[in-house]
Image: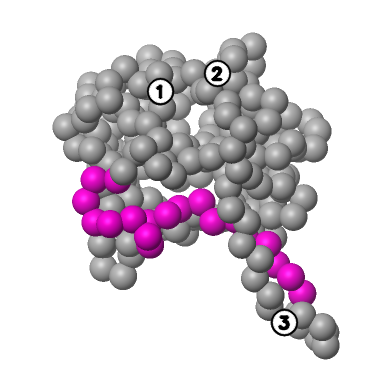
Amino acid sequence: MRRFPIVMAVLAGIVTEIAVPARGASQPARVAVVRVDTWDTAPDGPLDLSRDWQLNPHAPSTTFRYPPAIILDGPHRALRIRTDHESVSIWRMVRADLRRTPRLVWDWKVLGLPAGGDVRQPGRNDQAARVTVLFEGLKSIVYVWDTQAPVGTEVRPDEFALVDRVLVVVRSGAARLGQWQHEERDVRADYRRIFGDEPPPVKLVSLESHSDDVQSESDTLFGGIRFER
């Protein structure tokens, strides 16, 4: 997996306010949802990477054998990222305040794991799927589906790098391969535990798939992604 430096920009995502009735209360409670994915409005086929989503500007290549694409998988409208001896990283600028929307909720489906990938080994640090949350202050938490490392593994490659990131294994191995999986993480709690203080605002979310270190292939579908209360 190539290390892509992250360039910050002052852009904001869209916060959608949804009014829902609170249980046992006569007045409606307001629940904030920050939508990250845009698959519902994107046309089928290769994803336009000049609008909401952009390719990492430090990617070694701007062309891929399988460009990120919007597909329909049963009832799921999804982004497919497939790699062949390469890394693909795309991002969207998103503004989220974890005091209001601390949980990251997403669905993903891995179709192919990079053979030999292992988040614990710097020379084999490839995963089929990553969901990266970057904060102001250049810290990030990366939620991954690893090939070998057990669920719960956390790796901090270099806390003195430009971006101080921690990779957290939330799925591992082929047991759920080819099946949609639903994930929920309390990102605010994860940040407090990992970095020891309150998280600053979220600046961007990136979706990634890697197979270049182990010279293999990977294949993942990303469904809905959002921050919730």
Closer to the camera in the image, 108 or 69: 69
Q: Is residue 115 above or below residue 48?
A: above
Q: 167 or 15, which is in the foreground?
A: 15
- Give the alpha-carbon distance from disc 2 to disc 3, as whole Å: 44 Å
Whether residue 111 is visible to the viewer of this picture, yes or no, is: no
Q: How is the image coloured?
A: one colour
Q: Is residue 184 left or right of residue 196?
A: left
213 vs 100: above or below: above
Task: Return the disc, 2 or 3, that comes first in the chain's sequence.
Answer: 3
> Which numbered disc flags the more N-terminal residue, 1 or 2?
1
Q: Amino acid at mark 2?
A: Pro
Residue 125 percent coordinates (x, y)? 40, 23
* Residue positioned 81% across, 33% down in the render: 197
Q: From the image, tell me which residue sits under label 3.
A: 21
Q: Could one spot residue 123 in this view of the protein?
A: yes
Q: Quadrant of the C terminus?
A: bottom right
Please name the amino acid that badge 3 sits on: Pro
Quadrant where the N terminus is found in the figure: top left
| Magenta region includes residue 76 | no
Dot 1 surroundings within 10 Å: few (below 14), some, or many (20 or more)?
some
What amino acid type is highlighted by mark number 1? Answer: Pro
Question: What are the residue bounds of the magenta stretch?
Answer: 29-47
Question: In the orientation shown, which residue stands out farthest toward the top?
Answer: 160
Q: Quadrant of residue 168?
A: top right
Residue for badge 1: 57
* Picture disc at residue 157: 2
